[in-house]
Image (spheres, grey):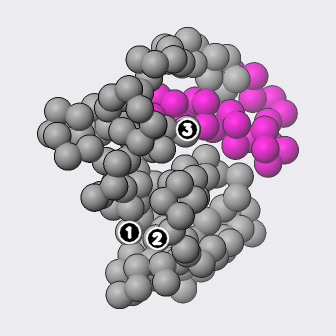
Amino acid sequence: MIRLYDYTASANCFKVRLLLALLDRPYERVPVDIFAGESSTPEYLTKNPAGRTPLLELETGDMIAESNAILLFLGDGTPFVPVSLKERARVWGWLFFEQNLLEPNVGTARFWRLTGRDVGREAGREAAAVVLGLVHVGPELRIGGDRLGRGDGLLPA
């Protein structure tokens, strides 16, 4: 069975858990308390030298780091990663946008709020609001087509 090394409040971890649930794929969740230093232990660093979550451990013992790489790996061959190169490029484009604009602004503001560390971070909330203004929620956000499954399971920031 695959293992997901995971920090509950992380949106990057959440989106992997969401896709696993949408795929109805069994996995073992291994909680990693990043604030207690669990992602910086020598044992964890042998699995992921960057010391980040999420981290997916395959049945073979191979590791896949970085949330979007994990999403693309898990989604391959499913309706969540399209076959058409043009549709896949739309998925990749969204994933790059999400990591470069949404995650550092919206995801970070959410993370600080969830972990009770948002005091004095008003600028982060303001940046999140600006970035959210770039995203138009509606049918046009269905990045690979007009039905759930064309990359939509890869969307949460």
Question: x, y (%) of residue 38?
Answer: 66, 74
Look at the numbered discs 1 and 2 and tell me whether their residues touch, using CB distance below 8 Å: yes
Q: What separation in Å lies between label 1 and label 2 (alpha carbons)?
A: 5 Å
Disc nearer the start of the sequence (3/1): 1
Residue 24: in magenta span:
no
Residue stretch in magenta: 96-123
Q: Residues within 10 Å of mark 1 (few under 14, many from 20)?
A: some
Q: What separation in Å lies between label 2 and label 3 (alpha carbons)?
A: 18 Å
Decide whether the magenta segment is chiefly helix, strand or loop.
Answer: helix
58 relative position to 18: left or right? left
Which residue lies at the image location 68% right of the left edge and 72% below the top edge?
31
Residue tagged 3: 157
Q: Residues within 10 Å of mark 2 (few under 14, many from 20)?
A: many
Q: Amino acid under label 3? A: Ala
Residue tagged 2: 56
Q: Considering only vertical position in the picture, is 11 above or below 104?
A: below
Front one among 40 and 62 = 62
Q: Would you say residue 127 is visible in this rendering? A: no
Which residue lies at the image location 78% right of the left edge and 44% below the top edge?
114
User: Picture quarter containing residue 77?
Assistant: bottom left
Q: Considering only vertical position in the picture, is 14 above or below 58?
A: above
Q: Amino acid under label 2? A: Leu
Disc nearer the start of the sequence (2/3): 2
Residue tagged 1: 64
Which residue lies at the image location 66% right of the left edge and 62% below the top edge?
7
Q: Amino acid under label 1? A: Ile
Callout 3 secondary element: loop
Look at the numbered discs 2 and 3 and tell me whether their residues touch, using CB distance below 8 Å: no
141 relative position to 118: left or right? left
Callout 1 secondary element: strand
